[in-house]
Image (cartoon, rainbow, N blue to C red):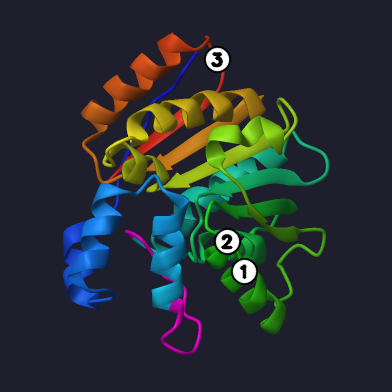
Amino acid sequence: MLLFTRLAVPLRTLQKLTKAHRWHHTSLTNELIENMDKKATWDRFYTENGSKGQFKNFEWFFGFDSVKDFILPVLQSRSHSHTGQLNILDMGCGTSALGPCIYRNSPCAVKVICADISTVAVKLMQKHSNSTLVQPCNLSSALAFLELDCTQLRGYFDARSLDLILDKGTTDALVRSKEGQVKAGQIVKQCLQVLKPSGSLLQFSDEDPDARLVWLERELLKGFPSDNTVFVQKY
């Protein structure tokens, strides 16, 4: 059984973010829009974004503070029926602080894996984490960074091994690229294979939830029935 929950958080659109930050020139903007499913595109983006000097987390849509009052209670509720760490995957993390902030602030023990297809993004995150050691709220928590193609999650994670998968704009990027729709569908199926039966896929999106729900239901029908929970976040 799938449960779709609508939530509302005031966030900025990609177009407004692009204009406000002016973080790249026109050629990169066009490449990003047309090739969001390509590793080379993101390596170039994070190389240029990270060449400006001191490291700064880059947030698509929003930061941890906007959703902490939702995510932390979700983790707390999972921990009541769970022994040991909760296994969390921040899928397509880029250089967002979302995963590290969950690691630092979660009162229950978590193992947060921040994963991205971009080698550059993963190295930047790992280097920053090593240079800014922070004690987590729960001393049993752990944080890791991993380079991976999210269409191949089963190559990295065992079946039914994850408690929560966070998708903050990753599916959005794929469905808007020329060849990304098929990959986005593959990711959904992979997520449901590596999530525990009680696990959740939490999507944050700038797409209308009705449109996203239709797409998710269609992709799930292509795969297999699931008892997992899928949340769709609107802004």
Residue 138 left/right relative to 149: right
Q: Position of residue 165 (x, y in %)?
A: 56, 40
Check the image and name the residue furthest to the bottom: 53
Task: Identify the residue at image location x=62%, y=23%.
Answer: 193
Residue at mark 3: 226
Tell me if label 1 and label 3 are in contact, CB under 8 Å. Answer: no
For the magenta stretch, what is the residue range? 50-61
Can the viewer see residue 10? no
Magenta-span inclusion, residue 60: yes
Closer-to-camera residue (178/141): 178
Residue 15 left/right relative to 89: left
Location of residue 27 (image quadrant) = bottom left
Closer-to-camera residue (6/28): 28
> Which secondary structure is most common in the magenta stretch?
loop
Mark 2 residue type: Thr
Residue at mark 2: 119
> Which label belongs to residue 123?
1
Q: CA distance from mark 1 to mark 2?
A: 6 Å
Task: Identify the residue at image location x=76%, y=58%.
Answer: 141
